[in-house]
Amino acid sequence: QKEVEQDPGPLSVPEGAIVSLNCTYSNSAFQYFMWYRQYSRKGPELLMYTYSSGNKEDGRFTAQVDKSSKYISLFIRDSQPSDSATYLCAMSAPGRDDKIIFGKGTRLHILP
Amino acid sequence: NAGVTQTPKFRVLKTGQSMTLLCAQDMNHEYMYWYRQDPGMGLRLIHYSVGEGTTAKGEVPDGYNVSRLKKQNFLLGLESAAPSQTSVYFCASTGGTGTLYEQYFGPGTRLTVT
């Protein structure tokens, strides 16, 4: 079993829709849960992160972590064509490991 | 403040040739990483460094070597390039354990080995 599983998509939704992106993981030591966004032919950039469980909201983006189910989600409200990108979930266990484990990324297309 | 820069941006090598990819960061970050990204495979860690003079192997280290002689630079070497090393290479840096969640990535190097 891979440490982090993410559906690669592609996922196509109409502009204005709510988008749900998800990852599952197997390592219960993970404490930081991140979402990176990567535009075509660019490097990934951190979108938002959550420490331990719970929700975090930033504008149109909401990150959720359910540690009991080992499941994390990113919701995008009022999706825009500019949100079209690859979204990578990532996780880390600071203090135990110096690395971030990335999911394979989900390609998202927002259709105008 | 340029962040993380990578040199070169593109390169075509013949099988068996060698090359060095340079990563530089101006954020005084302790940790630096080299990844490769291939379609359907996501980001895979090649080597990383937790401080000047240190290096460690990641998930796919074979065929690569690294050096961190200066805190701001992290070099990735291919001694004898193979077509399987055709990929996009990303360098990243972060401040350390306390900020491990936020890695700053460079723009990438597109390498083709023929």
Image: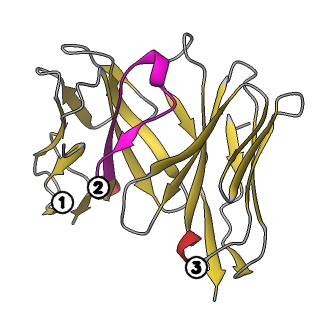
Indicate the chain on which mark 3 is placed.
Answer: A
Kindly indicate the quadrant of the structure image that contains residue B87: bottom left
Crowding at dot 2, Cα within 10 Å, few <14 / some 14-19 / many 20+, comes out as many
Indicate the chain on which mark 2 is placed.
Answer: B
Q: Are marks 3 and 1 in contact (CB under 8 Å)?
A: no
Residue lying at the far top of the rendered structure: A95
Instruction: Mark yes or no: residue B64 visible.
Output: yes
Q: Vertically, is B23 above or below A93?
A: below
Q: Nearer the viewer, residue A3 or B6?
A: B6
> Which of the numbered marks, if any, corresponds to residue B100?
none
Left or right: where does residue A65 sit relative to residue A99?
right
> Which of the numbered marks, if any, corresponds to residue A81?
3
Q: Residue at x 44, y 52 (%)?
A: A44
Q: Residue at x 13, y 55 (%)?
A: B8
Q: Are marks 2 and 1 in contact (CB under 8 Å)?
A: yes
Q: Nearer the viewer, mark 2 or mark 1?
A: 2
Residue A40, given in percent of the width and then of the height, sits at: 42, 69
- What's the CA distance linking mark 2 and mark 1? 8 Å
Which amino acid is tagged 1?
Answer: Lys
Which amino acid is tagged 2?
Answer: Pro
Q: Quadrant of the N terminus of chain A?
A: top right
The part of the chain drawn in magenta is B89-108
Q: Residue at x 61, y 38 (%)?
A: A49
Instruction: Mark yes or no: residue A98 visible.
Output: no
> Which of the numbered marks, if any, corresponds to residue B9?
1
Of the image marks 2 and 1, the number of the one nearer the N terminus: 1
Left or right: where does residue A93 sit relative to residue B64?
right
User: Regarding mark 2 in the picture, which secondary structure is present there?
Assistant: loop
Please give the residue where the numbered disc 2 appears in the rendered image.
B107
Crowding at dot 3, Cα within 10 Å, few <14 / some 14-19 / many 20+, comes out as some
